[in-house]
Amino acid sequence: MNRRSLILIILSLSIVTMVACSTIGQKPAESTKPEGSVITVKGKIGQYMGNYFLKGENPPQEYIIVNGDPKLLDGLLKSGRTVTIEGREAMGADRLFIDKIDGKPYTGK
């Protein structure tokens, strides 16, 4: 192997390494909504140890609310009324990211 071939191999490996390292350092685009199954649940808002949850009546299942907004959810908790929530299952089957409450857009924290 001559000196020229060795230099070309080293240069090629250096370029490949630089390209690979530049893609590793990039952050993926963050989305505001998690990916997950879209679900609609009728139920009541509850609270336990500072966390809000939805006690579903239809389907009968409890969900921990991921994007809870105390200003809105406290009112629903105190009223005790049944609401229809559209959202997405996030980080597992027992976590819920709310998109709408009673057909109105919801922007939680």
Image: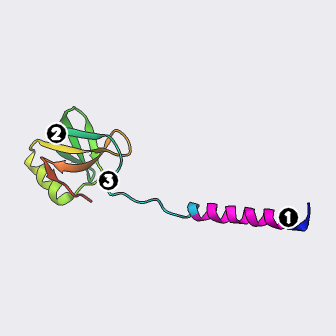
Which amino acid type corresponds to the residue marked 2 in the rendered image? Gly
Which residue is denoted by mark 1 in the rendering? 6
How far is mark 1 from mark 2, CA to CA?
Answer: 70 Å
Classify the position of the N terminus by image quarter: bottom right
| Secondary element at image label 2 | strand
| Secondary element at image label 1 | helix
Which amino acid type corresponds to the residue marked 3 in the rendered image? Lys
The verdict on residue 2 being magenta is no
How far is mark 3 from mark 2, CA to CA?
Answer: 22 Å
Please tell me the numbered disc located at residue 33. 3
Please name whichever residue, 2 or 50, is drawn nearer the observer in this view of the structure: 2
Tell me where the magenta segment starts and ends, as one range. 6-22
Please name whichever residue, 19 or 75, is drawn nearer the observer in this view of the structure: 19
Crowding at dot 3, Cα within 10 Å, few <14 / some 14-19 / many 20+, comes out as: few
Q: Which residue is found at the position 52% from the left and 63% from the top?
A: 26
Q: In this view, does 60 lie above or below 78?
A: above
Q: Which of marks 1 and 2 is nearer the N terminus?
A: 1
Which residue is denoted by mark 2 in the rendering? 43
In the picture, measured across the screen, residue 19 lies left or right of residue 1, that is: left
Q: Which residue is found at the position 24% from the left and 57% from the top?
A: 108
Q: Main secondary structure of the magenta part?
A: helix
Q: Whole-percent x and y of residue 3? A: 89, 67
Q: Whole-percent x and y of residue 99? A: 23, 50
Q: In this view, does 22 lie above or below 85?
A: below
Q: Whole-percent x and y of residue 94? A: 32, 40
Crowding at dot 1, Cα within 10 Å, few <14 / some 14-19 / many 20+, comes out as: few
Classify the position of the C terminus by image quarter: bottom left
User: Quadrant of the rendered structure where residue 36 is?
Assistant: top left
Nearer the viewer's eye, disc 3 or disc 1?
1
How far is mark 3 from mark 1, CA to CA?
Answer: 50 Å
